[in-house]
Image (cartoon, rainbow, N blue to C red):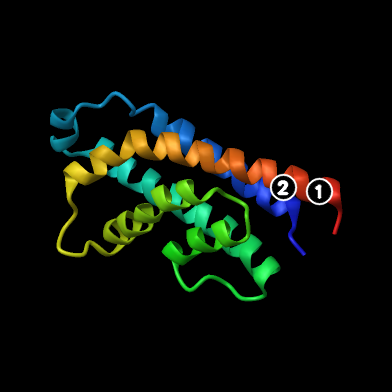
């Protein structure tokens, strides 16, 4: 059974990370490429945003389908299958899993331009993601188990 309290707690974390990332919304590419603490803070926030969304996905999908998604990318596909998020949003969120993996594992180095470009995308797409999850959760809670 989906635990609405757990999902809402994770959504609160997601909103907090998005607010923190929003403080960096207007960083220019030149400023970003200068590196330092701000760059690492942005990288970490992007990582946390994807991870908390994947946690939400895993919980909901496992409860609905009986098996967890195979990876972060599949977790967004599965949320589409479970009708929690729309198809087009799931497609736009899939690349975030690859970005998260690149940040964590530094496959071939980190593409700072890609990370910088991800800031406004993450702010927009993960807010839409949260709205979709809340709508689904509200509907799920009204309809009962």
Residue 126 vs 76, above or below: the answer is: above
Q: Residue at x 22, y 61 (%)?
A: 106
Left or right: 35, with 6 as reference point: left
Residue 32 vs 145, above or below: the answer is: above
Label ID, residue 89: none
Q: Residue at x 15, y 63 (%)?
A: 108
Residue 48 showing in the rendered view: no
Q: Choose top left, top right, bottom left or bottom right for residue 38.
A: top left
Disc 1 vs disc 2: Cβ atoms closer than 8 Å?
A: yes
Residue 20 vs 99, above or below: the answer is: above
Q: Residue at x 40, y 34 (%)?
A: 21
Residue indicated by mark 1: 141
Residue 67 vs 110, above or below: the answer is: below
Observer-nearest residue: 47 or 99? 99
Residue indicated by mark 2: 137
**What is the crowding at mark 2: few (fewer than 14 residues within 10 Å), some, or many (at least 20)?**
some
Q: Choose top left, top right, bottom left or bottom right for residue 45.
A: top left
Q: Choose top left, top right, bottom left or bottom right for residue 80.
A: bottom right
**What is the crowding at mark 1: few (fewer than 14 residues within 10 Å), some, or many (at least 20)?**
few
Circle 1 SS class = helix
Q: Position of residue 68 (x, y in %)?
A: 58, 72
Observer-nearest residue: 58 or 36? 58
Question: Is the C terminus in the top left, top right, bottom left or bottom right quadrant?
Answer: bottom right
Total marks in image: 2
> In 3D space, how far apart are the residues under numbered discs 1 and 2 (Cα atoms)?
6 Å
Q: Position of residue 31 (x, y in %)?
A: 17, 29
Residue 22 showing in the rendered view: yes
């Amino acid at each position: 059974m989906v635990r609405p309290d757990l999902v809402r707690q994770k959504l609160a974390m997601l909103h907090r990370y998005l607010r923190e990332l929003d403080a960096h919304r207007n960083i220019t590419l030149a400023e970003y490429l200068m590196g330092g603490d701000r760059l690492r803070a942005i990288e970490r926030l992007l990582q946390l945003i994807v991870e908390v969304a994947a946690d939400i996905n895993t919980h909901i999908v496992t409860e609905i389908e009986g098996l967890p998604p195979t990876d972060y990318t599949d977790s967004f596909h599965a949320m589409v299958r479970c009708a929690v998020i729309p198809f087009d949003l799931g497609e736009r969120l899939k690349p975030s899993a690859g970005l998260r993996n690149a940040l964590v594992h530094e496959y071939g180095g980190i593409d700072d331009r890609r990370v910088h470009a991800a800031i406004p995308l993450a702010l927009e797409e993960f807010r839409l993601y949260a709205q979709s999850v809340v709508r689904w959760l509200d509907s799920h809670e009204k309809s009962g188990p």
